Image (spheres, rainbow, N blue to C red):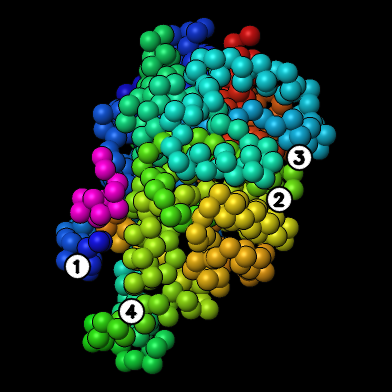
């Protein structure tokens, strides 16, 4: 079976769907190929296990190799990780853009105004807005109160979830269709313009005509692309596809970066109710410059909360029983560490020596903030620390082991494995997003980011994909 | 009050579901974690394995010792056991009722 299109896009997440939206305005001949299943809002349930099994990659237990295995969280369904993220819409920070411009030579290729303008348009289309206080719930309110008390810069989280009811289920798929994940926003738009969506189909390789990408091969069919193939399969799967397609460049799969992070849990004497309120509705930026961490709330279902509590037996059960009075805040770290993705898809990642001190500083600050707003105990599940810290004991966090294996880390923002550089010897794609040494083959996802961001990347991923697609049809 | 004893809450039925849905490497690591808990954890508290021969106090001490082991690999296996157990236990209606997680 063969189908011919102007454009074939691999991946239907933030990048692929955004590219599809732009391209479908200029042609009806767009194909989007998604490895995962199609999902609908009415399928989303309030149980972690079936959700993980159906729409998370490797059931959410993909781990890095290295001294400290870290969970890598990715969606695997139509809409990609936008289906399971918390809808956070952050602009590319200017200080990060300056690094990209000064150290990676991308200033003229990605002018800040152009990235910002694309972000404006996406923000508007996806109806992003600060999380209304009416759906904060107590977890978000506590972080807001802590930020005010400590005079830390913080704000209501800007999210593309108009009409959010505060059901705390973003990460299980929004049960009300309020979150503007790609499967309820850009993909339906593209399909209404004629784009075709192929689901449950893994792209095996790019098909070549000389150095020109002429389409892709899946297990079921060949999809021809007369104008371009756009790869938006994520920073883990994109390099694998490039290798499977016969490309060789020493930067493919290297420079893997992310935001490893962990949680701090405050135990209060009053009800917090993690099941009520926006999943991530308040955030603190005031620690970014000092400790390279962002502090944000995170509502979790009981399954995830229980699994993250330290201890065994009676101690563990006692901590589970604290669920109604627990607040959970997380600290994604803008790590210096880098890793790599191998041809077989395994991911190696090691923290840089500067990373753990930053993380500990952030964790201690977060624990102090918990006590500031009335926590009775704080759980900071680092190996070697008491299971519950009392006020006055947070200094123990800063003297915690310098061994990454002592920290239960997870990573959900992934970058860099096909990075952009004007120089073929320094990157995989050029400043026009085209893979060096090829014609008609473009990478438009976060693989092209030369560094991590320190903030949630969804909007920047969409903005860069939008710029790439707009330039293709210009 | 949270219900006690995972095996009294239908965990074995859940494992059938788990085996059908979980990726092969996750299933393998879970089985490895069960073996380690059964045969290594008792040794850590000076008891002769397997775990099934120990009384409940010694079982609890053995698992706690594995959780506090200086070997990160053993600690990580405890995390795997707790993760799978939590996927079942945290979804139980009686548990959700007990912690006020009403839906």
Chain assignment, label 4: B
Q: Residues within 10 Å of mark 3 (few under 14, many from 20)?
A: few
Q: Are marks 4 and 3 in contact (CB under 8 Å)?
A: no
Report helix, strand or loop for mark 1.
Answer: helix
Q: Are marks 4 and 2 in contact (CB under 8 Å)?
A: no
Residue linked to disc 1: B7
A218 lies above or below A469: below
Kindly tell me whether residue A473 is visible in this rendering.
Answer: yes
Q: Are marks 3 and 1 on the same chain?
A: no
Q: Residues within 10 Å of mark 2 (few under 14, many from 20)?
A: many
Chain assignment, label 1: B
Kindly tell me whether residue A245 is visible in this rendering.
Answer: no
Where does the magenta region start and end?
B93-103
Q: Name the image quarter holding the N terminus of chain A.
A: top left
Residue linked to disc 2: A291
Report helix, strand or loop for mark 3.
Answer: loop
- Determine the residue positioned at 70% across, 60% down: A357
Q: Are marks 4 and 3 on the same chain?
A: no
Whether the magenta-drawn stretch holds residue A261 is answered as: no
- Determine the residue positioned at 34% across, 59% down: A321
Q: Position of residue A189 (x, y in %)?
A: 42, 13
Q: Are marks 4 and 2 on the same chain?
A: no
- Whole-angstrom CA distance, mark 4 to mark 2, is 38 Å
Q: Position of residue A140 (x, y in %)?
A: 50, 39
Q: Residues within 10 Å of mark 4 (few under 14, many from 20)?
A: some
Q: Position of residue A260 (x, y in %)?
A: 58, 51
* Corner quadrant of residue B61: bottom left
Mark 4 or 3: the one toward you: 4
Residue linked to disc 4: B60
Residue linked to disc 3: A425
Report helix, strand or loop for mark 4.
Answer: helix
């Amino acid at each position: 079976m063969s189908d011919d299109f102007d454009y074939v896009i691999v991946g239907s997440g933030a990048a692929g769907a955004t590219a599809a939206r732009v391209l479908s305005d200029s042609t009806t001949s767009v194909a989007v190929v998604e490895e995962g299943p199609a999902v609908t809002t009415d399928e989303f349930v309030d149980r972690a296990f079936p959700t993980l099994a159906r729409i998370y990659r490797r059931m959410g237990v993909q781990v890095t190799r290295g001294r400290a295995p870290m969970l890598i969280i990715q969606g695997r369904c139509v809409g990609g990780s936008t289906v399971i993220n918390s809808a956070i819409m952050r602009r590319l920070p200017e200080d990060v853009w300056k690094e990209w411009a000064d150290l990676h030579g991308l200033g003229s290729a990605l002018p800040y105004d152009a990235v910002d303008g694309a972000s404006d348009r996406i923000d508007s289309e996806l109806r992003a807005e600060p999380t209304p206080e009416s759906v904060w719930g107590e977890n978000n309110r506590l972080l807001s109160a802590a930020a005010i008390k400590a005079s830390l810069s913080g704000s209501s989280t800007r999210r593309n979830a108009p009409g959010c009811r505060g059901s705390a289920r973003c990460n299980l798929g929004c049960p009300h269709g309020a979150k503007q994940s790609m499967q309820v926003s850009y993909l339906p738009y593209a399909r209404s313009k004629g784009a075709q969506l192929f689901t449950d189909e893994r792209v095996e390789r790019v098909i070549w005509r000389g150095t020109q990408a002429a389409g892709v091969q899946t297990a079921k069919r060949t999809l021809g692309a007369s104008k371009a193939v756009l790869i938006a399969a994520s920073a883990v799967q994109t390099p694998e596809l490039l290798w499977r397609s016969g490309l060789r460049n020493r930067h493919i799969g290297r420079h893997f970066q992310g935001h490893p992070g962990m949680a701090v849990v405050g135990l209060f004497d009053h009800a917090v109710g993690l099941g009520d309120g926006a999943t991530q509705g308040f955030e603190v930026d005031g620690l970014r410059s000092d400790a390279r961490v962002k502090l944000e709330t995170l509502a979790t279902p009981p399954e995830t909360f229980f699994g993250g509590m330290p201890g065994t037996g009676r101690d563990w059960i006692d901590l589970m029983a604290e669920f109604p009075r627990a607040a959970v805040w997380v600290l994604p770290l803008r790590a210096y560490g880098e890793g790599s993705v191998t041809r077989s898809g395994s991911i190696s990642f090691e923290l840089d020596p500067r990373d753990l001190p930053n993380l500990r500083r952030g964790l201690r600050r977060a624990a102090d903030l918990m006590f500031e707003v009335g926590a009775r105990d704080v759980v900071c599940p680092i190996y070697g620390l008491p299971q519950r810290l009392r006020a006055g004991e947070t200094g123990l966090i800063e003297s915690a082991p310098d061994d990454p294996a002592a920290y239960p880390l997870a990573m959900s923002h992934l970058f860099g494995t096909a990075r952009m550089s004007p120089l073929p010897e320094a990157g995989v794609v050029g400043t026009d997003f085209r893979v060096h040494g090829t014609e008609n083959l473009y990478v438009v996802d976060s693989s092209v980011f030369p560094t991590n961001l320190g903030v949630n990347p969804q909007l920047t991923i969409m903005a860069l994909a939008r710029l790439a697609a707009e330039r293709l049809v210009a | 009050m949270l219900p006690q004893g995972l095996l009294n809450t239908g965990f074995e039925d859940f494992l059938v579901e788990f085996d059908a849905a979980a990726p092969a490497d996750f299933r393998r690591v879970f089985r490895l974690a069960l073996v380690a808990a059964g045969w290594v954890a008792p040794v850590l508290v000076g008891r002769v394995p397997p775990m099934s021969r120990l009384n409940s106090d010694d079982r609890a001490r053995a698992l706690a010792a594995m959780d506090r082991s200086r070997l990160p690999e053993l600690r990580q296996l405890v995390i795997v056991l707790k993760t799978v157990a939590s996927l079942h236990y945290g979804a139980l209606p009686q548990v959700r009722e007990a912690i006020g997680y009403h839906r």
